[in-house]
Image (cartoon, rainbow, N blue to C red):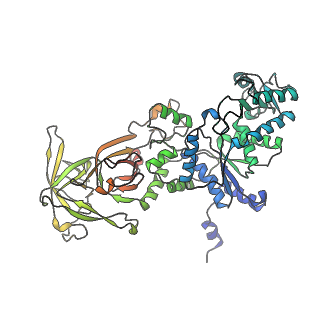
Amino acid sequence: MSTEKEIKEDRPQLNFIEQMIEKDLAEGKHDGQVHTRFPPHPNGYLHIGHAKSICLNFGLAQKYNGKCNLRFDDTNPEKEDVEYIHSIKEDIKWLGFEWDNELYASDYFGDLYNFAVQLIKDGKAYIDDNSAEKISEERGSPTSPGKLSAFRARSIEENLSLFEAMKNGEVEEGVRVLRAKIDMASPIMQMRDPVIYRVKKATHHRTGNQWSIYPTYDFAHGQSDALEKITHSLCTLEFASHRPLYDWFIDALDLYPSKQTEFARLNLSYTIVSKRKLKELVEGGHVDGWDDPRMPTLAAIRRRGYTAEAIRNFAHKIGVAKRDGVSDVALLEHSVREDLNKKANRVLGVLNPIKLIITNYPEGQTEMLPAVNNPEDESAGKRQIPFGREVFIERDDFMEDPPKKFFRMGPEREVRLKYAYIIKCTGFKKNDAGEIEEIYAEYDPETKSGHDTSGKKVKGTLGWVSADHAVNAEVRLYDRLFTTENLNDIEDDFKNHLNPTSLTTMSHAMVEPSVGDMAPNTQFQFERLGYFIIDKDSSTDKPRINRTVSLRDTWAKQNK
């Protein structure tokens, strides 16, 4: 029988947000409901940092039989696009989650306008004619109080009239704003009469030209939460200083008491997750678009071959903390390897080929050999691969003068060709430049895999493909986009830290015939080389293949 201590140790440890929710449920708060939301801005593609927030918000709703809304914070029409909305929805579904309600901050533009009018009537908001520069100057600094605006004492009637004129399109951009009237001496900068409405003569993707004024994020966020009766509003730590303002609006408007709680954002080593900087990479031509497999966007890592299961497992492993830190990208790559090892079939491929001629094998003969599809999954079965007199092997698998611990091929050395025979190198040929262009070997017919009667033991096993049946493919070897581990600590231009070898294209790779028939997004392991995926731009004439991740953490080995 398990002891009480063992039972406690077997129970999964709760993070601080789960502890808070379970305390709320135990105390009967929110009528026993858990209602979260994921509120992305539709002004760019989601990245790996968003994946943590998605897994947290949707995951908590699942765990506690609650609900999670997808609410687009579409309060800045100049930067928003329907393309981003579609991509965000696709990313969330790919991660394995479904939202209970698809909502938009623009659903509440009428409510938010009425809330602003209420604040004006209560003497808690005013129209300011100062420029953005003047308002910023008068806000002061964290160590000195701000100055009261010359327009702060306007009457309620004048403020209402001016605000209506703003709404009706009678005021140009930058001429007037609506500010909350709170405390210009507050030690919290966000509480120093923040701007809550501004004029924007832009066409909105949903409301068209109905509105000439738009609420700021801070004004729309908490009120949208309250209107949806969100019980647990979860934000990353950079929004902690906004919480007093979040609470102030809800209290001032007497709304449903949604509560904001902050958690540490995901910072990943060797990775940038700033939308502004990612856009700079795209527009500067440093990467080939938002879904370039080197980018940290979810569209990019999906194209690279990272699986949704691996991302969810990674989010679970790093947990939920109260303090910012940097998570090791090697843990993410480990999660990907761990998942693909179970589900990816194995195939043979040669990225940098050199021809090997087995001189004592019958010319013109083709032998079909059985190969295991996935040693981790017996139900995956076997396939037949062709073998003949001429095969391709990796150029790096041969050395003219190999060191003692090099267990691959060299003169007079024996190795096994995977699923085939043991061969012995008998010679090689060089071209005029002194480069080896052909290798010669003899095979031992008694050493056929699965039927070996020779008693021979060799230490090296090589991958290969039949030269007569190989399919030429383009293989893209992706590596980390940056060479610096913690990009939060750099003081110079982040582009100075780009990895010049983040993409290596192998245009003359040779792969087994089955790869030529694979559909885009098919994932597999090239034995001994790593995990790969057929790219969306692939064709039957020449497959295009992306490396998802190597078999081992080569960066750790290099650093060591």
Where residue 149 sits: x, y (%)? Answer: 80, 24
* Left or right relative to 339: residue 54: right
Where residue 221 sits: x, y (%)? Answer: 71, 42
Q: Which residue shows up at 38% across the image and 56% down it?
A: 524
Counting labels gives 0
Examine the rendered structure and indicate whether residue 421 appears above or below residue 294. Answer: below
Q: Which residue shows up at 15% across the image and 41% down it?
A: 431
Towards the viewer: 242 or 483: 242
* Left or right relative to 159: residue 241: left
Where residue 395 sits: x, y (%)? Answer: 24, 48
Q: Quadrant of the N terminus?
A: bottom right
Q: Which residue shows up at 19% across the image and 48% down it?
A: 401
Q: In which quarter of the image is residue 372?
A: bottom left
Instruction: Report if residue 184 is visible in the image.
Output: no
Instruction: Report if residue 221 is visible in the image.
Output: yes
Examine the rendered structure and indicate whether residue 384 appears above or below residue 432. Answer: below
Towards the viewer: 513 or 369: 513
Where residue 440 sits: x, y (%)? Answer: 15, 53
Q: In which quarter of the image is residue 105?
A: top right
Q: Which residue shows up at 75% across the image and 60% down it?
A: 32
* Left or right relative to 439: residue 294: right
* Left or right relative to 436: residue 384: right
